[in-house]
Structure formats: C-alpha cells, structure tokens
Image (cartoon, rainbow, N blue to C red):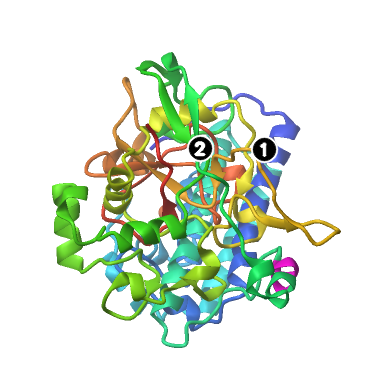
C-alpha cells in the first residue's frame, strides 16, 4: 500500500474529517460505558469478539492504516499490537486465531484505554499537519469501520448476556421507556401493541441502476453503479413480526422439510433449531409453549413482543418463513430500487431503543378510545433484511488497492446480502446502496424478514 501525493486540501475538509473521527471514537466509548471490565472479556460464540477487543481493534485500524504511513515520526504504542489486534488482513501481518480473543486478559482494559488515548492524540497531531488526501480517505474508512464494530459490540454483548444465567440487561429501558412503563401500568389490555396490517407496495421495475451514486463515502463493494433489469414486484410494508413467526412455528415450520432449502433443513437438524436464536421456551408442542425473547433490555414474554419485528433469524429461516407464507425474499436490487431517494428514517441506533419496535402502536386518545397509529413505510432499521441475493462483486468491481482490498472483496463467496440496517446501526452509517453480508446460517445479528412477491 502506498500513500499518494495529495493536492492542497481545504481546512473545511480537514476539520470535517476530524469531527467525523472524534464522533465515531466518542460513540464507541459511550456504548461501552454500560459494561464492566468482566463483561468486556466475554466471547460467547464463534462469530463474536470481546468488547475489549473491539476497543483495541478499531484503534489498531487507525494506527496501522493512517498513523504509521501518514504521521511522520509516529511511535507505535506497542510493537506486538500490530499483529495482536489484526483481525484478518493477511497481507499486513500474521494474527491470532479469532477464537482466542477471549484469552486476551492481557493487555488489560486500562492498557487498551491508554492505547486508544495514544492513538487519538496522534490523530489530533495529524489533523494539525494537513493530512494527505489519501489519509483523509482512510480516516473516513476508519470511522465507518469503527461504526461497524459499534454494531458488533452490541450484538456480541447481547449474545454474551443471553448465555449468562442471570440474563443481565444492557439497558433498563429504551428511549420510550417512560411510555412503556405507563402502558404496563394500564394493564395488558391498554398496553397491547398491534402490528400494522400487512400490505404490499407495488413497484414497476424496468431498467434501473444499482450501486452508490454521488460523492459521499461508500465501501468498495457498493461500486460500480451499474444498470440492471427488474420485473414488476411488490415489497411488504413492514417486517414480519414475532407473532407471525410464532404462527409459522405453530404450523410445524421447523418440522416440515418442504419449507426449507436443503442446506437450511440440514442446519435445522444439525443445530436443533426450533425458534429464533434468543427465544427460550419449554420443550414440547410450540403451540403450548410460553416463549420468552431475550433482548438488550432483558428477557421479555413473547406475547409482549407479538407486534415486534422478529429478529436473530438466519437466511434459511427467513427463506423458509417466506415459502410457508406463500411469498419470497426480495433481491438486494429490488430493495435498493424501492428505497433509493428516501430519507434514512427508522429505528436505528440513534433512536435509543436498542431492540426492534412495532411499526405501529395502539394509541389512546383523550376519551380513552384506542386507535391504531398508522406510520408510513420505513425501510431502514429494526432488523437487517435478508435478501435472496448472493454477495458478489458488481460488474467491473475493483477492491481497494493494497491491504485494504481485503476489507470486503475476499468474502465474496458463500454469503448472502442483507440491507437496511438495524436497531443498533448508527443512522449516519446506513444508506440505500449499503451491502451487509453474512453466511446463510448466521443468527446472532439483528437480522429479520421483509416479504416480497
Ligand atoms: Fe474490523
């Protein structure tokens, strides 16, 4: 990887880059404030990493790809950190096996926090020295990278707390906590939330373009923008709810191979799946089962969440549900064409809910009568939507040059695309062309279902 010579950059661009950097760094610390040092050590499943590792690895990214190349005289904080906190960049250095991250009791949390301070201070020096254009591009990438790890930090701690017998809560309440409390005090009749009626929005299709447009930041996998053909299609006006998913289960969804792709049915049998990842219940007939759902705000009875979007399902489960419902999953391009040009609105990290919420609530007027509050269709937030699209490079795709070319491109096999962000995705991070990707059996992310036909 080589630094390119830069033209003179405007002070505004440098100051915007500094603000972007600081905001991302602050947000990570804010999210980890609610965790104890012991919480930060837990790595409870193969996909997850300890929170402490996230704090260090995001710092490593700036040290490795920005400071070492662009800040003259930069002294690394610790020589071993260069390989210790490398995640998967083969061309940068060797790195420890992912499953060993829970063994990193050393360096201690204090030392990791000092590492963050050391790198943050050096970055401030860089901002004072008129960084090269390539440095600013990498800082933008580093801020976006840190935001991805903010989401991972929360999904990983959710799994950690789910496996803890005490079932701790990451947060007591969401931003609408007071309203929820009020509803609970009114009793179950007053508090019941109903989903918006399921409807489908029609789209004409035709010749469309997909991929990132404009001058704003995007990842390399969102490019190049290219033309494609869409047949007429329709998308559901909301995500599938927990209540609807429970009907699929009650109808033998996990017992009938006819709903499942072959690899999905294998996964059901091999893993003993009988419900979404964080649903717990007694064994036996799912119709008689009193399910609970574990969230970042603790364990909730399923009946309280009947109108809430179902989350933590794999691609296979999403696909099986759609087949059972007589529908299908959207392609990533159908989703993008429907959403392009719409404002980024929805239940994202900034809403402060930290879990999916119903798309429509029952609201009570001044006379005590209950009405359904209709909301316009929101495509962003709550849960990432599994699409039926395999994660592949767009026509003419080129990964970034050098080591950073390993960021996205090398994962373009055996993964499915997800769109739209979740309740733990920072709002500034998501856009119409954004492509998330995971293996089809993945369940620990906030991943849900939007039907198409
Ligand atoms: Fe990373």
Q: Is residue 290 left or right of residue 295?
A: left
Q: Quadrant of the N terminus?
A: top left
Regarding residue 309, the answer to whether it shows in the image is: yes
**Horizontal and vertical percent for residue 23?**
67, 52
Regarding residue 3, the answer to whether it shows in the image is: no
Image quarter for ligand 1 equals: bottom left
Name the one closer to the observer, 451 or 3: 451
Task: Name the image quarter holding residue 132.
Answer: top right
Q: Which residue is mark 2?
A: 199
Q: Nearer the viewer, mark 2 or mark 1?
A: 2
Name the one closer to the observer, 295 or 53: 295
**Relative to 447, residue 50 above or below:** below
Name the one closer to the observer, 257 or 225: 257
Decide whether residue 175 is among the magenta residues: no
Residue occupying image coordinates x 66% and y 71%: 173
Name the one closer to the observer, 178 or 281: 281
The stretch in magenta equals: 177-181
Graded by Cα atoms within 10 Å as few (under 14), some (14 to 19) or many (20 or more), the crowding at tag 1 reads: some
Does ligand 1 reach within 8 Å of label 1's beta carbon? no
Q: Which residue is mark 1?
A: 130
Provide the major secondary structure of the magenta segment. Answer: helix
Q: Quadrant of the C terminus?
A: top left
**Horizontal and vertical percent for residue 387?**
36, 39
């Amino acid at each position: 990887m080589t630094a390119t010579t830069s033209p003179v950059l405007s002070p505004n661009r440098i100051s915007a880059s500094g603000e972007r950097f600081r905001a991302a760094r602050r947000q990570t610390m804010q999210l980890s404030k609610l965790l104890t040092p012991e919480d930060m050590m837990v790595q409870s499943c193969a996909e997850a990493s300890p929170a402490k590792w996230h704090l260090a690895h995001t710092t490593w990214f700036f040290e490795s790809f920005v400071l070492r190349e662009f800040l003259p005289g930069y002294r690394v904080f610790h020589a071993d950190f260069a390989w210790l906190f490398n995640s998967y960049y083969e061309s940068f250095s060797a790195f420890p096996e992912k499953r060993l991250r829970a063994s990193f009791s050393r360096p201690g949390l204090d030392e990791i926090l000092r590492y963050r301070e050391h790198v943050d201070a050096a970055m401030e020096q860089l901002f004072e020295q008129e960084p090269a254009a390539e440095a600013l591009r990498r800082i933008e990438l580093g801020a976006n990278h840190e935001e991805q790890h903010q989401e991972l930090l929360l999904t990983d701690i959710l799994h950690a707390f789910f496996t803890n017998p005490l079932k701790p809560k990451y947060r007591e309440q969401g931003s609408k906590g007071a309203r929820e409390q009020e509803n609970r005090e009114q009793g179950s009749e007053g508090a019941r939330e109903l989903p918006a009626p399921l409807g489908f929005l029609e789209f004409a299709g035709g010749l469309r373009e997909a991929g990132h447009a404009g001058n704003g930041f995007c990842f390399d996998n969102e490019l190049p923008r290219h033309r494609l053909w869409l047949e007429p299609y329709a998308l559901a006006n909301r995500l599938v709810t927990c209540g609807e998913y429970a009907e699929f289960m009650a109808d033998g969804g996990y017992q009938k191979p006819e709903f499942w792709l072959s690899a999905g049915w294998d996964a059901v049998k091999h893993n003993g799946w009988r419900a979404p990842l964080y649903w717990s219940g007694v064994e036996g007939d799912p119709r008689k089962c009193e399910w609970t759902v574990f969230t970042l705000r603790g364990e909730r009875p399923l009946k309280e969440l009947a109108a809430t979007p179902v989350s933590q399902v794999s691609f296979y489960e999403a696909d099986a549900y759609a087949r059972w419902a007589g529908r299908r999953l959207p392609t990533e391009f159908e989703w993008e064409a429907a959403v392009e040009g719409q404002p980024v609105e929805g239940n994202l990290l900034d809403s402060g809910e930290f879990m999916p919420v119903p798309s429509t609530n029952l609201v009570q007027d001044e006379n005590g009568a209950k009405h359904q509050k209709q909301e316009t269709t929101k495509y962003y937030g709550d849960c990432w939507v599994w699409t039926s699209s395999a994660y592949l490079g767009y026509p003419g795709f080129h990964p970034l040059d050098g080591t950073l070319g390993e960021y996205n491109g090398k994962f373009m096999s055996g993964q499915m695309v997800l769109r739209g962000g979740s309740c733990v995705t920072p709002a500034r991070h998501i856009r119409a062309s954004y492509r998330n990707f995971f293996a089809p059996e993945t369940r620990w992310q906030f991943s849900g279902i939007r039907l198409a036909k």
